[in-house]
Image (tube, rainbow, N blue to C red):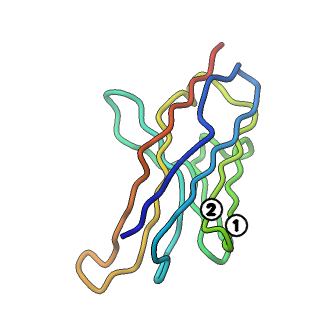
Amino acid sequence: QVQLVESGGGLVQAGGSLSLSCAASGSMFRLYAMGWYRQVPGKRRELVATITPGGSANYADSVKGRFTISQDNAKNTVYLHMNRVEPIDTAVYYCNAEFYSDLEPGRVWYWGQGTQVAVSS
């Protein structure tokens, strides 16, 4: 089992910055990637950014150039640095850890409890 604990959410003004962190505990063996997703009421959870243990990052088009994902492998922690935030970034942000699995569908996903980010205009 893997536990993910997020921190750093809150209220921020449009144009400002906010950073989130996610600390993972448990076995990280066969980790594929960690990342951040977000969800607003009535909509599907959407990808924000992911990063592999080797440092390869992937971003949603809506956050490219504004958000940066980073990690500290020694601490099993992933960060999301959010710059030039906009009201559309308001959502609950969830940390995710994806692992390889020998069982179908070949992946196992773990989620944090979520942290609210609210951007005021």
Residue that label 2 marks: 77
Of the numbered discs 1 and 2, the one sitting upstream in the chain is 1
Q: Residue at x 49, y 76 (%)?
A: 28
Kind of residue sitting beneath label 1? Asp
Q: Quadrant of the C terminus?
A: top right
User: What SS does tag 1 mark?
Assistant: strand
Instruction: Report which quarter residue 3 is drawn in.
Output: bottom left
- Could you tell whether 15 is left or right of 91 in the image? right
* Callout 1 touching callout 2 (CB < 8 Å): yes
Q: Is residue 75 above or below residue 118?
A: below
Q: Quadrant of the N terminus?
A: bottom left
Residue density around tag 1, few if under 14, some if 14–19, many if 20 or more, within 10 Å: few
Question: Where residue 72 is drawn, which disc sits there?
Answer: 1
Estimate the x, y position of residue 90 in percent, counting from the top left: 54, 27
Estimate the x, y position of residue 87 in percent, counting from the top left: 60, 22
Seen as rendered, the residue at the extreme top is 121
Q: Is residue 66 above or below residue 51?
A: above
Estimate the x, y position of residue 73 in percent, counting from the top left: 66, 72
Estimate the x, y position of residue 95 in percent, counting from the top left: 49, 52
Instruction: Report which quarter residue 63 is drawn in.
Output: top right
- Could you tell whether 80 is left or right of 28 in the image? right
